[in-house]
Amino acid sequence: MSAFKDQLQVDLDAAFFNTDEFAKTVVYTPKATGLGVSIAALVEYGVQENNSHGKKGDDYTWNVICQRDVRSAFDRGRTRDLATVEVKASDVPEPHYLDTIEIDGAVWTVTEVYDA
């Protein structure tokens, strides 16, 4: 690994994913196992305009789009609460559709996954 990549990993851990700085502690629960784990994550509420839409990223983080109070596919056009959550790939190696994330006591459902 290059010195730049090593420094990037240090910065992610020491600053961005530090809960005393930018991150929050959330509980990520894969639907497949049902076993939640507390991790640090970056949370931004609302729709994010610039997603990578499947573009291969840096292998350090994932962006997951979450909805609260997910309704059926027939309920189109209704307003839903949205959040974009960035997690470290080392904490969540393979996020999936319908996994859940508990943020500040509210449960959010993963509806989209992007390699950040």
Image: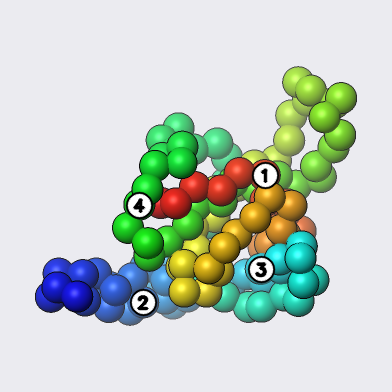
Mark 1 and mark 3 in contact? Answer it, CB < 8 Å: no
Estimate how packed mark 4 is, as few (under 14), some (14 to 19) or many (20 or more) residues with alpha carbons within 10 Å. few
Estimate how packed mark 3 is, as few (under 14), some (14 to 19) or many (20 or more) residues with alpha carbons within 10 Å. many
Q: CA distance from mark 2 to mark 1?
A: 26 Å
Mark 2 and mark 3 in contact? Answer it, CB < 8 Å: no
Query: What amino acid type should be assigned to the residue bearing mark 3?
Result: Tyr
Secondary structure at numbered mark 2: helix
Q: CA distance from mark 1 to mark 3?
A: 14 Å
Residue at (65, 55) in percent of width and height = 96
How many marks overall? 4
Sequence-wise, which precedes: disc 2 or disc 4? Answer: 2
Give the residue number, with chain letter if any, for mark 4: 57
Estimate how packed mark 2 is, as few (under 14), some (14 to 19) or many (20 or more) residues with alpha carbons within 10 Å. some
On the image, the x and y values in percent for residue 17 come to 42, 71
Sequence-wise, which precedes: disc 3 or disc 4? Answer: 3
Give the residue number, with chain letter if any, for mark 2: 13
